[in-house]
Image: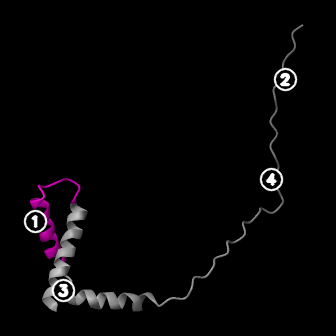
Amino acid sequence: MATKKSAKTTSKRAPSTTKKRIKKPVKVTARKATKPAAKRKAKAIVIRAASSPTRKQIAERAYEIWISNGCPPYSQQANWYQAEKELARTHLAAGQ
């Protein structure tokens, strides 16, 4: 006698009527009060404005450094910083 296998029935859950859990807010601690950013940056801007080279001057000097070093790849940032340092030194000396 062959018996038929009963198909498994899937039961669907009824929607939950309980409230969903809400995550608690994270506590944020306050930092120590410091000078406002505008006051801190204002001094640096005043100092730089009188003695800083232009972007074009830095770019030209960085290119000269790159050529004199034999055009090495991936040296743009180092050349830029070196040019900034050299030009800042010369601008400060000229301003004094």
Which residues, given as a range, are shown in magenta?
54-75
Q: Secondary structure at mark 4?
A: loop
The disc, 1 or 3, on the residue closer to the chain's N-terminal end is 1
**Amino acid under disc 4:** Pro
Query: Could you tell me if residue 95 is visible in this image?
Result: yes
Residue receiving disc 2:
6
Query: Vertically, is 85 above or below 23?
Result: below
Residue 1 figure quarter: top right
Instruction: Name the front one of labels 2 and 1.
Output: 1
Instruction: Name the front one of labels 1 and 4.
Output: 1
Residue receiving disc 1:
64
Residue receiving disc 3:
92
Residue contact between numbered discs 2 and 1, judged by CB atoms under 8 Å: no
The Cα–Cα distance between marks 2 and 1, rounded to whole angstroms, is 85 Å
Q: Secondary structure at mark 1?
A: helix
User: Relative to the observer, which residue lies in front, 58 or 27?
Assistant: 58
Instruction: Name the front one of labels 3 and 4.
Output: 3
The Cα–Cα distance between marks 2 and 4, rounded to whole angstroms, is 27 Å
Q: Name the residue at 15% across, 86% down.
A: 93
Query: Vertically, is 93 above or below 11?
Result: below
